[in-house]
Amino acid sequence: MTESKPKIWALIPAAGIGSRMKAELPKQYLEIDDKTILEHSLSKFLEHPSIDKVVVALHPNDNHWAKLKIAKHPKVITVEGGETRAESVLNGLQAIKQQKGGDDWVMVHDAARPCLDTASIDALIQAGKDSKHGAILAIPSVDTVKLANANQTIDKTLNREQIWLAQTPQYFPVEALATAIDIGLEKGLPITDEASAIEAQGQHPALVIGTRKNIKVTEPEDMMLASVWLAGN
């Protein structure tokens, strides 16, 4: 009897309200070229043959998702998000485990990163074959990096050759990530992304070079830049 191959899931925490965008809608529901940011962010996973299912964690009072055509996609599963990103991701991971996916792998991706390309997904999948601790997309810093002090003056200059800017997706074994986030939340650790939870357990995820077009829409001006990148996809 042959051993079944682990599946790959995508998990999109989309329960945020996007206050920095100064918009009436949560930012994931703002439109770029007649599609919401969330639809753009989901599309590459739904189209990718290696992604089995996509879990979307929604705010309990979300009344926008059901109006989207993508909400009825057969590969999509929704769960209720938590008060923080980490809690939303953990809820999604628990849903995957309930689907007998505890031995599978998961790519966690920001709802507000609409410009992800297929090649980046492929690169993460390949990196996961070589790294038991998982892998994340990131880009090396091209700027000189300053460390500030409490007075907002420069304390020192960091070696930018060691500085990487984390992106998503971040790709880990489901059980390992769920355990790491659970422990991190219990200890009150700052979990700013999935890798930080894994790192707190003494593990070392691989860095996979991403692209600068994989931006996170955070400020209003990011909408225009994302539109330019999407037009070139």
Image: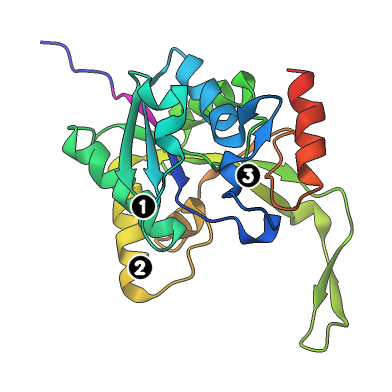
Q: Which residue is mark 3?
A: 167
Q: Position of residue 130 (x, y in %)?
A: 47, 30
Disc on the earlier residue, 1 or 2: 1
Residue neighbourhood size for the residue with mark 3, other residues' Cα within 10 Å, grouped as few (<14), some (14–19), many (≥20): many
Identify the residue at the far bottom of this view. 151
Q: Amino acid at mark 3?
A: Gln
* Front: mark 1 or 2: 1
In terms of image quadrants, where is residue 101? top left
* Label annotation for residue 185: 2
Q: Is residue 224 above or below residue 91?
A: above
Residue at point 74%, 55% (across, down): 163
Residue at point 32%, 37% (across, down): 78
Span of residues in magenta: 6-11
Q: Nearer the viewer, residue 218 or 119?
A: 218
Q: Which residue is mark 1?
A: 81
- Distance from disc 3 to disc 1, alpha carbons, whole Å, reads 21 Å
Residue neighbourhood size for the residue with mark 2, other residues' Cα within 10 Å, grouped as few (<14), some (14–19), many (≥20): some
Q: Position of residue 141 (x, y in %)?
A: 80, 50
Q: Is residue 10 magenta?
A: yes
Q: Answer with left or right where residue 66 lies relative to residue 122.
A: left
Q: Amino acid at mark 1?
A: Gly
Q: Is residue 127 magenta?
A: no
Q: Answer with left or right where residue 132 lies relative to residue 145.
A: left
Q: Is residue 187 above or below residue 222?
A: below
Residue at point 24%, 34% (across, down): 103
